[in-house]
């Protein structure tokens, strides 16, 4: 998509800029696309508990072969493989959606779109103790959704759009003995990006020119998986268990999810940047007709120093970083007038390195690797859980100057 595009629609003058995010040759993608890999050693109260590993991919793109009409796919995949002292558990999930979109621009900056998608996937969960397999569940998944949204451009010609949206979705997870179905409406917001094909690097000269002077004093980066998401709605969950004749269980519930992740860096000197990461997460579920609700909230704040190699050429894109953060998390459950609350203090330290590979004037693929130490302390028992290990991945970063 980025470095060897040969589609005839891309052979346009590179000074041309699309007047709409839905123009022929545009790529539309989620600004939070990323891949990650974590490998951790785990200790609780100073006692070894085992090892945890996880990896995953989040990817979403749509291409417009003609004005207004686009097609593409979204892929989410994750794998958690944890080996503790007395048991192991494995969970995997993969879902692929095929999407079609129609979009139009009215006036100078009013963008509207309608998008429909159908998805297929599978998930698996397995737990094995030292003596036997406790469970081994496999499900085939199906999903469908319809969405309308209105992207608002952030800045002039940046390619970034703040995108409120509303939609309706259906999801089914099924195996030989159980079927779960859920459906409901939602409102949400996300950051999206749209770039014409001519904006991408088509050769090494483009890649070099896009990265020149990016690390001078006064420049800024929004990095990592920076994103904003707000989502709420009502859902109906229908669960059918066993053979024909077994009861069907229907639950109606409302939910809300809010997430803010920001990684921001400002170059205070040439090749030296200071910044911070801020993460806020809140979720609520309230089952109607039942006295049962959950409410979870967490935040972390992580100041960071970043330095690029002070050399000319491509090696100037290499950077190292040092991060230290604090935060808290709270998990609360109300069930039949019985309330359970768990509170934790969080801290982390991270040392790592990365490389900014610019594929457009202000966007870069950034592979990274680091070693981190995460500590979770139960506020009531004072027991600490420490996870330390390697982390690696590829994220998108956005560069700009005030």
Image (cartoon, helix red, strand yellow):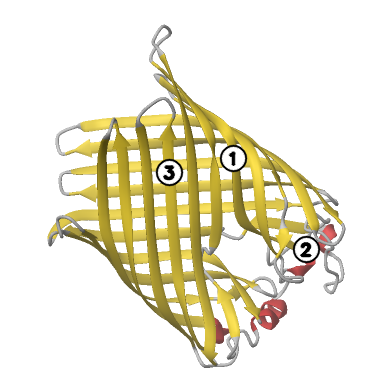
Q: Which residue is mark 2?
A: 196
The mark that comes first in sequence, 3 or 2, is 2
Label number found at residue 186? 1
Q: What residue is rendered at 55% in x and 51% in y? A: 230
Provide residue 57's location: percent of width, then percent of height. Answer: 50, 53
Q: How far, Cα to Cα, is label 3 from label 2?
A: 39 Å
Label number found at residue 348? none
On the picture, is 155 further left or further right than 242?
right
Other-residue count near label 1 (Cα within 10 Å), few / some / many at <14 / 14–19 / ≥20 = some
Q: Which residue is mark 3?
A: 284
The N terminus, quarter of image: bottom right
Which residue of the protein is positioned furthest toward the front in this rendering?
337
Q: How far, Cα to Cα, is label 1 from label 2?
A: 30 Å
Q: Is residue 56 visible?
A: yes
Task: Determine whether the residue tagged by mark 1 lies in a helix, strand or loop.
Answer: strand
Judge whether 151 appears above or below 121 on screen: below
Provide residue 205's location: percent of width, then percent of height. Answer: 71, 80
The mark that comes first in sequence, 1 or 3, is 1
Other-residue count near label 3 (Cα within 10 Å), few / some / many at <14 / 14–19 / ≥20 = some
Q: Quadrant of residue 360?
A: bottom right
Between 3 and 136, which is closer to the camera in this rendering?
136
């Amino acid at each position: 998509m980025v470095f060897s595009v040969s589609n005839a629609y891309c052979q346009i003058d590179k000074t041309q800029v699309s007047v709409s995010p839905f123009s022929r040759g545009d790529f539309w993608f989620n600004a939070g696309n990323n891949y990650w890999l974590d490998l951790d050693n785990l200790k609780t109260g100073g006692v070894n508990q085992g090892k945890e590993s996880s990896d995953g991919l989040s990817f979403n793109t749509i291409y417009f072969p003609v004005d207004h009409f686009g097609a593409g796919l979204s892929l989410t995949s994750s794998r958690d493989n944890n080996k503790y002292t007395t048991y192991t558990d494995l969970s995997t999930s993969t879902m692929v959606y095929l999407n079609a979109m129609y979009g139009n621009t009215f006036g100078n900056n009013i963008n509207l779109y309608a998008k429909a998608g159908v998805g297929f996937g599978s998930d698996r969960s397995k737990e094995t103790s030292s003596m036997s397999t406790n469970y081994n569940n496999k499900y085939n998944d199906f999903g469908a959704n319809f969405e309308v949204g209105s992207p608002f451009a952030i800045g002039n010609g940046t390619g970034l759009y703040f995108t409120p949206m509303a939609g309706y979705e259906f999801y089914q997870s099924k195996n030989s003995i159980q079927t779960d179905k859920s459906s409901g409406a939602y409102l949400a917001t996300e950051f999206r990006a749209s770039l014409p094909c001519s904006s991408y690097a088509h050769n090494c000269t483009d890649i070099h020119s896009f990265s020149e002077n990016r690390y001078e004093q006064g420049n800024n980066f929004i990095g990592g998986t920076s994103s904003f998401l707000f989502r709420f709605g009502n859902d109906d969950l229908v669960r059918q268990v066993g053979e024909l004749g077994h009861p069907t269980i229907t639950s109606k519930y409302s939910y809300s999810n809010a997430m803010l992740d920001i990684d921001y860096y400002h170059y205070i000197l040439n090749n030296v940047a200071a910044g911070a990461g801020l993460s806020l997460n809140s979720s609520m579920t309230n089952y109607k007709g039942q006295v049962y609700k959950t409410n979870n909230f967490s935040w972390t704040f992580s100041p960071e120093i970043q330095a690029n190699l002070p050399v000319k050429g491509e090696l100037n894109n290499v950077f190292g970083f040092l991060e230290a953060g604090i935060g808290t998390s709270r998990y609360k459950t109300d069930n039949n007038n019985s309330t359970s609350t768990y509170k934790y203090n969080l801290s982390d330290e991270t040392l790592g390195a990365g490389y900014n590979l610019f594929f457009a004037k202000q966007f870069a693929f950034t592979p990274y690797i680091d070693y981190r130490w995460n500590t979770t302390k139960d506020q009531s028992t004072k027991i600490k859980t420490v996870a330390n290990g390697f982390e690696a991945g590829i994220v998108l970063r956005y560069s700009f100057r005030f």
